[in-house]
Image (cartoon, rainbow, N blue to C red):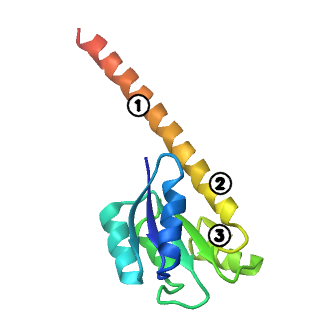
């Protein structure tokens, strides 16, 4: 199961994005937060695979949160949904530490496809790891005989 932390200060967007995320197979929204301090606390306490950061044009969730998330968890996937969107802004977000950047208004389907693909990759990796563990345990049992 892929674990997602949703970070948005929009009371309107939070339930809509939670509903979208709940429809994606093998994905669980482990928490949602509305401010930078709680984002940091939740990244540390929930250990999500993905942090979805929604950055509307104006809001309490500041743009400095992405580099902070990247510093405290270098392996987490950070997906930024933003308004307004342009390619120059996408590069700025990626330089700040975002893995993927999508427009909230024009690229919502690509965002959903991205989370679906990430979930599938995690499921495949988990299955491979399980097979490798089983094989390793089988070899150890034979060696012990």
Q: Residues within 10 Å of mark 3 (few under 14, many from 20)?
A: many
Q: Which mark is residue 113?
A: 2
Going from N to C along the chain, the mark reached first, 1 or 3, is: 3
Going from N to C along the chain, the mark reached first, 2 or 1, is: 2
Going from N to C along the chain, the mark reached first, 3 or 2, is: 3
Q: Is residue 12 above or below residue 140?
A: below
Q: Is residue 4 above or below residue 139?
A: below
Instruction: Please tell me which residue is depicted at 53% across the width and 37% down the height of the picture.
Output: 124
Task: Check whether the beta carbons of the residues at disc 1 and disc 3 lie within 8 A of each other.
Answer: no
Task: Check whether the beta carbons of the residues at disc 3 and disc 2 lie within 8 A of each other.
Answer: no
Counting from the top left corner in percent of width and height, residue 29 is at 42, 60
Q: Is residue 135 left or right of residue 123?
A: left
Report the residue that reaches farthest toward the top. 145
Q: Which mark is residue 101?
A: 3
Q: Which residue is mark 1?
A: 130
Task: Tell which of 61 and 63 is nearer to you.
Answer: 61
Counting from the top left corner in percent of width and height, residue 45 is at 30, 65
Q: Is residue 134 above or below residue 49?
A: above
Task: Tell which of 49 and 10 is nearer to you.
Answer: 10
Compute the Cα span from label 2 to label 1: 26 Å
Task: Tell which of 125 and 116 is nearer to you.
Answer: 116
Counting from the top left corner in percent of width and height, residue 89 is at 70, 80
Residue 144 in which image quadrant: top left
Compute the Cα span from label 3 to label 2: 13 Å
Residue 52 visible (yes or no):
no
Q: Secondary structure at mark 1?
A: helix
Q: Is residue 97 left or right of residue 15?
A: right
Q: Residues within 10 Å of mark 2 (few under 14, many from 20)?
A: few
Q: Secondary structure at mark 3?
A: strand
Residue 23 visible (yes or no):
yes
Instruction: Please tell me which residue is depicted at 32% across the width and 22% down the height of the picture.
Output: 137
């Amino acid at each position: 199961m892929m674990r997602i932390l949703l970070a948005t200060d929009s009371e309107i967007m939070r339930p809509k994005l939670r509903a979208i995320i709940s429809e994606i197979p093998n994905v669980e929204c482990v928490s949602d937060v509305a401010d930078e301090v709680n984002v940091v606390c939740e990244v540390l306490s929930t250990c999500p695979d993905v942090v979805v950061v929604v950055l509307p044009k104006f809001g309490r969730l500041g743009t400095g949160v992405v580099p902070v998330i990247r510093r405290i968890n270098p392996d987490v996937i950070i997906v930024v949904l933003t308004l307004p969107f342009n390619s120059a802004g996408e590069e700025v977000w990626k330089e700040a530490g975002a893995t993927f950047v999508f427009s909230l208004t024009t690229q919502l389907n690509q965002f959903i496809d991205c989370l679906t693909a990430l979930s599938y990759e995690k499921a495949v990796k988990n299955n491979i790891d399980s097979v490798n563990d089983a094989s390793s345990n089988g070899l150890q049992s034979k060696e012990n005989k």
